[in-house]
Amino acid sequence: MLAPRGLGTLDPHFAVAHYDRMVASWMHGALVRFRPGSINPAEIEPDLAERWDVSPDGRIWTFFLRPGLTFHDGSAVTADDVTFSLRKAATATTSAYAGDFAVVRSIEVLDPATVRIALEYPVPSMPGLLANYAGGFIVSRRVEGVDPFASGLGPFRLASQAPGQMAAEFVANDNYFRGAPRLRRIRLQFVASLAASDLAFKAGEVDIVEGAQDQAWIDRTRVLADTTVDVIEPAEISLLHLNVTQKPLDDPRVRRAIALAVNRPELVAWRGADLARAARSVIPAGYLGFADGDLPSTDVAEAKRLLADAGYLNGVKLRTVHTQNPAMLGEIQVVQAELRRAGIELDIDVVEHQTYHAMIRKDLSAVVHYAAARFPVADTMLTQFFHSRSTVATPTAVTNFSHCAVADADLDAAHDDPDLERQLALWADAQHRIIAADCAVPLLETLQVWARRADFDYGFAFKGSMSTAPLLTEQSHFAIR
């Protein structure tokens, strides 16, 4: 039983919020998967595909399905379902992850158990594209979009969903190819506030609860009897994306003033040392291709001087559309106070979380505060957030909220170069260009926090989850009950 705060969709290819991706990981499978408890791309392993071949040039990938796979309604999983799912994931009208598949030239069925994927160029993150956390989920072609109770093939299937989506129940899929789950039922109960979820957990009404990304919450929860607090990877990096095409942000002096006004050590102290670290680039530390960005230190006086030089003697006023998510809202309010010291007034227009996602993707906010974790290779996050073809409100949109284009040449060259050392150098150059242009201001890297009953065992060491939320598998169980 869990008590998170919100579920937006049961379509895995529109699962953007981590609760939605969490549920998708229970209900669906993918050709490959991250080893449970790990976010290390070197530990990606077979899932629905029992094996795969790669051509010498890295452009042709052939996947061979396990025999006997079935969906929740008992129908067989075929290569046709796989091609349907991946084509759906690659189409903007049917997926939030279409931009990730821009590298894919074709997806075709070779026989009922074999799928071939051809790429425009080789990419180091190809397995991650097909893994179990974003666009890689496989759904039933026959019932997708019609019957969420039957479209999946994961260890748990949807049993019921309450009106208004305030609760959902999942039951064990005894035909799951890895074996019948040890958990027989999961009740997902949505609550309106952190206080309500805390009370439910303390009262024993729920067994797993999302924690606040707050040091005080960790400290007081760790001392509860029979409770384990898990602080897990990946860190979500939070950035302040600045639309370089809109006034006054089209002036690089204004963008640099914002970068100089932000105080990362202050943000870390506010968030807490157990779960936060200062961002050092526009992608998280530890990603393949990460390069320390040599970010400018806080300098309020210089920020004011730059604003005056740009003609804003009385400072500037900016507006951001922002989610009501408590962790993110608290962070932007700290940033708001830091910017105010430099004469930068940031008005925060708070909206419901799903509305926030819709509005920022329509380019309705010149300043976008966004926290994200992606497949841990530099190319993925840099391309999605900073390549011009990923610019929001365009046909190939992903999440380039800043309209940044300064790193296009580096990213394209890295795509075309199969030599890893040269790719690393190009990705490093891309990060330096993005930071020099202040397309986005790096803030924090924040880990994920969950609490559970001490007698609950995930079935693996819960060190990380690409959905940033609990992965429940056929091995998850209670040790005593």
Image (cartoon, grey):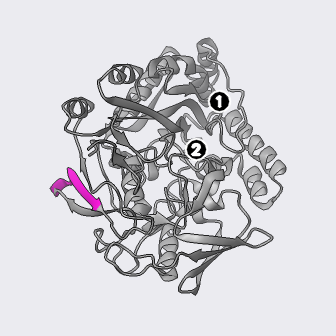
Q: Can residue 395 be seen in this view?
A: no
- Residue extent of the magenta highlight: 163-171
- Which residue appears at 52% of the width and 71% of the height? 86
Disc 2 crowd rating (10 Å Cα; few below 14, some 14-19, many 20+) is: few
Hey, which residue is sitting farthest left in the picture?
A: 163
Say whether residue 170 is magenta. yes
222 relative to 273 in the view: left or right:
left
Identify the image quadrant of residue 56: bottom right
Mark 2 to mark 1: distance in Å?
Answer: 25 Å
Of residues 158 and 443, which is closer to you in this image? Answer: 158
Where is mark 1, residue-wise?
280
Amino acid carrying mark 2 in the image: Thr
Where is mark 2, residue-wise?
245
Q: Position of residue 22 (x, y in %)?
A: 39, 51
Residue 177 numbered tag? none
Of residues 22 and 245, which is closer to you in this image? Answer: 22
Identify the image quadrant of residue 195: top left
Say whether residue 310 is magenta. no
- Which residue appears at 56% of the width and 48% of the height? 374
- Which residue appears at 33% of the width and 58% of the height? 9
Identify the image quadrant of residue 181: bottom left
Find numbered disc 2 in the image and state the secondary structure of the residue it sits on. loop
* Location of residue 235 with respect to 417 vertically, above or below: above
Hey, which residue is sitting farthest bottom in the picture?
A: 111
